[in-house]
Amino acid sequence: MENKFHLVPKKYHPIVREVVEDCGVVEVVLKRGFEYDTGASLACYERGEFCRADGTPSEHMLKQCIAREICCYNEVPLDQWDRDH
């Protein structure tokens, strides 16, 4: 599995633990103490969902979606984070 940090805007790199892709699914995991607004520390994206009108895959659309979701992160106390994750 190749590291895919280029899919995440650089300003969010300090809160991202890892970005991996396996079988067309990109996983973006936030570091301890950070959550998406859904309360999860992991978000998954299926590349097949991010295609241009002609059906060709669009890495740009995937990057935009990841950026929109990460920008709504929450910082939570570590004891709460440990309990929830």
Image (spheres, rainbow, N blue to C red):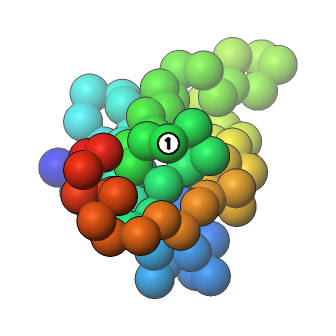
Q: Which residue is mark 1?
A: 39
Q: Nearer the viewer, residue 34 or 24?
A: 34
Residue at point 61% right, 59% down? 73
Disc 1, SS: loop
Quarter occupied by residue 3: bottom left
Q: Nearer the viewer, residue 80 or 44?
A: 80
Residue 18 appears anywhere in the view: no
Q: Count the numbered circles shown.
A: 1
Could one spot residue 46 in this view of the protein? yes
Tell me the kind of residue under disc 1. Answer: Gly
Residue ID at (37%, 31%): 25
Q: Nearer the viewer, residue 21 or 28?
A: 28
| Label 1 Cα crowd, 10 Å radius (few <14 / some 14-19 / many 20+) | some
- Residue 42 in percent (x, y) is at 38, 44
Q: Is residue 42 above or below residue 53?
A: below
In the picture shown, does residue 85 fall above or below 25?
below
Q: Residue at x 53, y 59 (%)?
A: 7
Q: Is residue 69 left or right of residue 16?
A: right
Where in the figure is residue 64, as x and y percent of width and height? 73, 50
Residue ranking furthest to the left: 1
> Going by the picture, which residue comes out furthest to the right?
53
Question: Which percent across, then down, holds residue 21?
Answer: 30, 43
Instruction: Pick whichever, 27 or 81, lies toward us.
Output: 81
Residue at image coords 28%, 65%: 79
Give the answer, above or below, for where 26 lies relative to 36: above
